[in-house]
Amino acid sequence: MARFLADENFNNQIVRGVLRQSPDIDIVRVQDVDLSGADDPTVLAWAAQEGRMVLTR
């Protein structure tokens, strides 16, 4: 199953709504993995290392 990382600009209401409807979807937020304030290359590197697709706006 796909794994996702929601960046700081992604609407958290969308994340909560998706998880409410489909709690088995694997979504973490940058805030959950101590990447708040990290630059884009750092976020992308972490997502790639973890096998996650980045959700952004």
Image: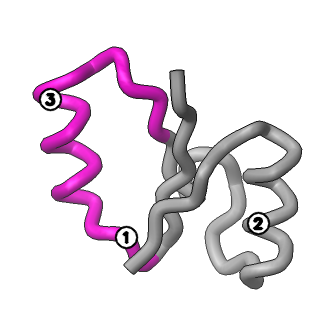
- How far is disc 2 from disc 3 in space, using C-alphas? 26 Å
N-term-proximal mark, 2 vs 1: 1
Residue occupied by mark 3: 20
Q: Residue 21 is drawn in which quadrant? A: top left
Question: In the rendered view, would you say 49 is above or below 23?
Answer: below
Q: Position of residue 39 (x, y in %)?
A: 76, 83
The residues colored magenta run 9-27
Indicate the secondary structure of the residue bearing disc 2.
Answer: helix
Is the C-beta separation of discs 2 and 1 under 8 Å?
no
Between 57 and 8, the one nearer to me in the picture = 57
- How far is disc 1 from disc 3 in space, using C-alphas? 17 Å
Tell me which residue sits at (70%, 62%) in the image. 35
- How far is disc 2 from disc 1 in space, using C-alphas? 14 Å
Q: Position of residue 2 (x, y in %)?
A: 53, 31
Indicate the secondary structure of the residue bearing disc 1.
Answer: loop
Neighbour tally class for label 3: few under 14, some 14-19, many 20 plus, Cα within 10 Å: few
Kindly identify which numbered label has been placed on residue 44: 2
Tell me which residue sits at (52%, 67%) in the image. 7
